[in-house]
Image (spheres, rainbow, N blue to C red):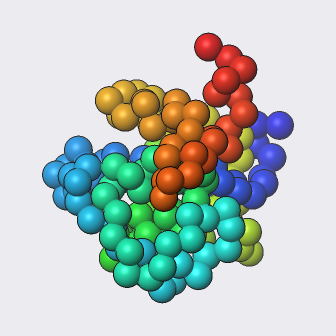
Amino acid sequence: NAHQVWYPASLAKLMTAHLAFRALEAGALRLTSPVVVSANAAAEPPSKMGYRAGTVLTVDNALKMMMVKSANDIAMAVGETIGGSEAGFVALMNAEARQLGMVATEFRNPNGLPMSGQVTTARDLAVLARAILLDHPQYRDYFSYTAILASGTVMPSQNDLLERYP
């Protein structure tokens, strides 16, 4: 069912990560650049880190939280940092999807929370995953962390497959 349309759910965070990697490679961001949690980001529902509006993280830590915890609030904050606003980032997501050849994908937010019209296909997500692997090999470790330590708490990855397959 490679072309069956469905909701991307948290796999939308793959596009958020891909665009963050592009910004890092272009020099628009550094791993130490600040990511500010806005009121909009802080208001996102779980799964989330739960930081207050105004909290400042590094791009590096934000990416780890987004990938390991599948943190909706952090994905929003990363998106707003790159795109200037949620709407600005969503426009970048959709432009990049078209550029990659993701013909059946439409993003509505950086984290994949359900929204009318936010759809993708298995084929389009495979195109995105391939682009991430080929275009950004230096960032592969972000997809292999089994846990992070945040605020004194160990948070295991939401991806149970990480410890099942080599």
Residue 77: x and y in percent read: 44, 70
Residue 134 vs residue 65, the one in the foreground:
65
Residue 135 vs residue 161, the one in the foreground:
161
Quadrant holding the C terminus: top right
Residue 78: x and y in percent read: 41, 64
Q: Quadrant of residue 43?
A: bottom right
Quadrant holding the N terminus: top right
Residue 62: x and y in percent read: 41, 56
Residue farthest toward the front in the current orientation of the protein: 152
152 to 163, vertically: above or below: below
Say how many tags the image has.
0
Q: Is residue 110 visible?
A: no
Q: Quadrant of residue 68?
A: top right
Residue 70: x and y in percent read: 61, 53
Q: In the image, what residue occupies the spot 61% across and 65% down?
A: 48
Residue farthest toward the top in the current orientation of the protein: 166
Residue 147 vs residue 76, the one in the foreground:
147
Q: Horizontal placement of 52 versus 114: left or right?
A: left
Q: In the image, what residue occupies the spot 51% across and 83% down?
A: 40
122 to 112, vertically: above or below: above
Q: In the image, what residue occupies the spot 49% across and 64% down?
A: 74
